[in-house]
């Protein structure tokens, strides 16, 4: 077979240049949007949220560096090694290089994963403090209900047979359990600022989710399970609670609100609700 | 095992009837094309569904002529979400690279006359076809298509119509379709594994196999272990729905104030079974693409694959680790937080072989003589997209960060780039690369390049902004987010993505036109239009019924002998004997 002397293509430089340029633009635009924080998440209102944001930022730095270097390396190779009639440099690889980048990525990626443990463990590995405000969150298609135990500090027993949203007992609080008499059920969540809150999350029908962006906290609610999570909000305000687990046709409008109020306002809120319940 | 095939005793007679030749064929090449055409049909459906979703997200109140009532309802939107995901993941991303190209080229690349079990191969395709019919039927049954997403989480998917429209017949058909698909893929995987192990040509050692074959082989092993689990899950879910069992349904379920008659099941069990399949499925979609990218990059850089062994081992490592990371889909599901941490570390470690692959791809290009043919452009696009889509996974792999990004558009952007678009670029690279072999004609290069530019830029325009929507808190699977507090600021981004999606979708017509036009009018390809080295290029285009016309090759060297110093030509086919190769030496 004769040597095929392939003429370097006239379009080669244009194609290589355009592709390399597009990749450079991709990198530039992406770096710009991240660096200027053009679409930021809402500011967090918990210490744990800050740790999450920190870990997010750390991950952004690591992946951002790898992103920039790989994409620019790719763009450079595309431009530099386009067919200009030169012979290809024959090599089958380089074991030293393989070792270097394997070790480097092991350290980088696993290190990152291990560092991220803190922001996870604080919320999830530790139980809530004994004096935390406890609120039970119950989800069903397509509403949230929040139950406070009332002055006795005890939640009444639940009986699924007694669930009747139409007659005002959406959770099915057992009428025969005295502990349930003073329970308060609310469509929104009100909690005191700078006081740990423990949520006991459960669901009646399908899987839903409790998500408050400012808390940097998401938790699925699963029928048959009671899942505890806790947080301490350090700023008063009105925040959106969203369902983020596909739960049926009304999923997009399944929403409630979290009101973080001062300790005094919280006590007033409880008092008002107790009076309301007593009447 | 394969000795009789290679000594030329096998007599393969081409069937004469149309039905035996093109419909119920046992020829792996015909079956490969059947899979490919099935995927092509499915991808057209899937794209239309996604465009409807994108349209609805920016014009929620618009009247659509073909929707009953005019305006898309929330449940219809969720049906689009569900059907788009299901059709794309199963009938496109699994079907085209493995069922299509794997079927066609694995036997030829290892020098075999056919798959190990040709009739089983035919059965796999036709069961897949039935599965596709079943999923399409879900559109037209009472109640419409299911609304529980491609993940079909129970109890939403397990209780029937009480939980919503589409959860009756639609959901049942979804489960039947998925189960049939699993069965077919299981049989297909068995066939791929047996073929790779038993039917390799003399001299085709494991480390002389093209990386495409490594990709298909490891994908088949994943398929064998993963599809069986989803099949079991599907059957149990079907029983929950129709036989009154409670595998996934706990006691005390109340829907519309009605206590449901179930007890003892676990909704998380479904998630474990689903993701035990579902995560390997991601690699089932992408590993063949990785193989194709390596193969094409080497061919058009005119260089051996950089670190061939490391590449093959990385494919195996990804396959192996791919089975130990499913829990990262479940960090916030109620699973033990300690499990979450373990899954997190395992998931971060799968970034290592992925990075090895990326560095080796760039290493393959380094010092090359890059020819920018259309397959090469798509392979280069694959690398760029894989990097972009892969790195965002490092955020989601950490449960703490997942707290903020889970279920947002960030996740949608991540998996679309890495397992959607990157895998599709792998499929396009394969199509432009092997079309000449399959149909004996070249596809139009100018049209192919035009298609590439639109698709490459378009894909990034759709999916890069989507990350920012997610970071800002935009939640996925919402039929309408205009009521939320953050939506207004994100709407311009949504608008941009929708326009980009329509332009990119329209650009795929260039591909369709090129494909069908070139079948008849493309330039004649010849045996080896790319000056490539592997065995499919030593036989006719298209290959004869037994692939090699009775002259089965023996293999004398690795698959990527490009630009070896001291030779007259810059490629040395795998089947050249040392004596033949010596004659090519520069005098």
Image (tube, rainbow, N blue to C red):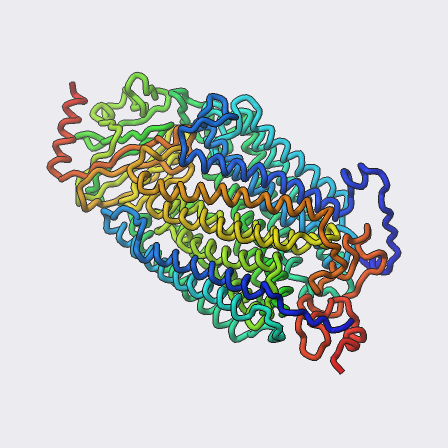
Task: Give the quadrant of the C terminus of chain B.
Answer: bottom right
A187 and B494: which is toward the camera: B494
The residue shown at (49%, 38%) is: B51
User: What percent of the width, then of the height, locates residue B144?
Assistant: 53, 25
A12 and A38: which is toward the camera: A12
- Spot the residue most to the left: A264
User: What percent of the width, then of the height, locates residue B302?
Assistant: 64, 68
Q: Is residue B309 visible?
A: no
The residue shown at (51%, 64%) is: A17
Q: Is residue A17 left or right of residue B298?
A: left
Splitting the image into 4 quarters, where does residue A226 fall? top left
- The total of numbered circles placed on residues is 0
Q: Is residue B543 left or right of residue A56?
A: right
Q: Is residue B341 visible?
A: yes
The residue shown at (51%, 73%) is: A97
- Spot the residue most to the bottom: B587
Splitting the image into 4 quarters, where does residue B30 fall? top right
User: What percent of the width, then of the height, locates residue B199?
Assistant: 76, 57
User: What percent of the width, then of the height, locates residue B200?
Assistant: 75, 59
The residue shown at (24%, 38%) is: A239
Q: Is residue B91 left or right of residue B536?
A: left
Task: Give the quadrant of the N terminus of chain B.
Answer: bottom right
Splitting the image into 4 quarters, where does residue A149 fall? top left
- Spot the residue most to the top: A167
């Amino acid at each position: 077979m004769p040597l095929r002397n392939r003429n370097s293509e006239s379009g080669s430089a244009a194609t290589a240049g355009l592709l390399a340029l597009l990749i450079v633009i991709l990198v530039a635009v992406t770096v710009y949007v991240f660096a200027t924080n053009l679409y930021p998440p809402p500011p967090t209102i918990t210490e744990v949220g800050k740790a999450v944001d920190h870990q997010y930022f750390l991950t952004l730095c690591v992946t951002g560096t790898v992103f920039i270097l790989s994409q620019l390396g790719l763009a450079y190779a595309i431009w530099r090694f386009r067919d200009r009639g030169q012979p290809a440099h024959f090599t089958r690889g380089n074991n030293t290089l393989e070792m270097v980048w394997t070790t480097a990525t092991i350290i980088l990626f696993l290190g990152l994963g291990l560092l991220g443990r803190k922001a996870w463990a604080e919320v999830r590995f530790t139980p809530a403090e004994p004096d935390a405000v406890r609120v039970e969150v119950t989800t069903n298609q397509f509403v949230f209900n929040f139950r406070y135990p009332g002055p006795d500090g005890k939640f009444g027993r639940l009986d699924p047979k007694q669930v009747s949203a139409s007659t005002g007992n959406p959770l099915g609080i057992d009428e025969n359990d005295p502990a349930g008499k003073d329970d308060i059920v609310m469509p929104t969540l009100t909690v005191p600022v700078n006081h740990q809150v423990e949520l006991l999350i459960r669901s009646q029908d399908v899987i839903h989710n409790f998500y408050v962006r400012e808390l940097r906290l998401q938790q699925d609610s699963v029928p048959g399970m009671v899942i505890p999570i806790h947080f301490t909000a350090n700023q008063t305000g009105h925040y959106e609670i969203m369902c983020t687990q596909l739960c049926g046709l009304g999923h997009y409008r399944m929403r409630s609100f979290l009101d973080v109020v001062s300790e005094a306002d919280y006590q007033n809120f409880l008092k008002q609700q107790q009076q309301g319940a007593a009447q | 095992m394969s000795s009789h095939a290679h000594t030329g005793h096998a007599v393969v007679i081409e069937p004469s009837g149309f039905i035996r030749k093109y419909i119920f064929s046992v020829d792996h090449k015909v079956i490969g094309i059947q899979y490919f055409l099935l995927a092509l049909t499915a991808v057209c459906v899937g794209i239309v569904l996604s465009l409807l979703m994108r349209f609805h997200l920016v014009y929620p109140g618009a009247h659509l002529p073909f929707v009953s009532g005019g305006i898309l309802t929330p449940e219809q939107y969720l049906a689009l979400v569900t059907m788009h995901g299901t059709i794309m993941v199963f009938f496109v991303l699994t079907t085209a690279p493995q069922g299509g190209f794997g079927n066609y080229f694995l036997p030829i690349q290892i020098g075999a006359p056919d798959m190990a079990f040709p009739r089983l191969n035919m059965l796999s395709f036709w069961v897949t076809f039935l599965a596709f019919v079943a999923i399409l039927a879900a559109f037209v049954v009472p109640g419409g298509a299911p609304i529980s997403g491609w993940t079909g989480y129970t109890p939403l998917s397990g209780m029937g119509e009480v939980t919503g429209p589409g959860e009756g017949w639609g959901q049942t058909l979804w489960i039947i379709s998925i189960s049939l698909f699993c069965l077919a893929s299981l049989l297909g995987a068995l066939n791929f594994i047996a073929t790779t192990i038993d039917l390799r040509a003399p001299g085709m050692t494991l480390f002389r196999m093209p990386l495409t074959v490594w990709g298909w082989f490891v994908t088949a092993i994943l398929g064998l272990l993963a599809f069986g689990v989803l099949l079991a899950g599907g059957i149990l879910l079907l029983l929950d729905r129709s036989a009154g069992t409670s595998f996934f349904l706990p006691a005390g379920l109340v829907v519309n104030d009605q206590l449901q008659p179930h007890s003892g099941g676990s909704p998380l069990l479904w998630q474990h079974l689903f993701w035990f399949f579902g995560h390997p499925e991601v690699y089932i979609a992408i590993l063949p693409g990785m193989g194709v990218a390596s193969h094409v990059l080497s061919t058009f850089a005119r260089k051996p694959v950089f670190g061939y062994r490391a590449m093959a081992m990385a494919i195996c490592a990804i396959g192996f680790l791919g089975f130990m990371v499913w829990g990262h889909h479940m960090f916030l599901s109620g699973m033990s937080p300690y499990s979450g941490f373990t899954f997190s570390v395992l998931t971060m470690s799968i970034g290592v072989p992925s990075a090895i692959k990326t560095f080796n791809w760039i290493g393959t290009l380094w010092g090359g003589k890059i020819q920018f043919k259309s397959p090469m452009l798509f392979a280069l696009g694959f690398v760029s997209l894989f990097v972009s889509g892969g790195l965002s996974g490092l955020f989601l792999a950490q449960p703490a960060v997942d707290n903020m990004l889970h279920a947002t558009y960030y996740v949608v952007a991540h998996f679309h780039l890495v397992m959607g678009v990157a895998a599709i670029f792998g499929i396009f690279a394969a199509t432009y690369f092997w079309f000449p072999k399959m149909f004996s004609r070249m596809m139009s290069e100018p049209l192919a390049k035009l298609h590439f530019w639109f698709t490459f830029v378009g894909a990034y325009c759709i999916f890069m902004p989507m990350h920012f929507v997610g970071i800002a808190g935009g939640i996925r699977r919402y039929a309408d987010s205009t009521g939320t507090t953050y939506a207004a600021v994100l709407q311009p981004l949504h608008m941009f993505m929708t326009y980009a999606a329509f332009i990119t979708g329209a650009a795929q017509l260039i591909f369709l036109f090129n494909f069908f036009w070139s079948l008849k009018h493309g330039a004649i390809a010849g045996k080896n239009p790319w000056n490539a080295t592997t065995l499919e290029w030593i036989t006719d285009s298209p290959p004869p019924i037994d692939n090699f016309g009775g002259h089965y090759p023996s293999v004398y060297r690795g698959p990527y002998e490009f630009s070896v110093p001291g030779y007259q030509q810059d490629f040395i086919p795998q089947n050249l004997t040392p004596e033949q190769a010596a004659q090519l030496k520069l005098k």
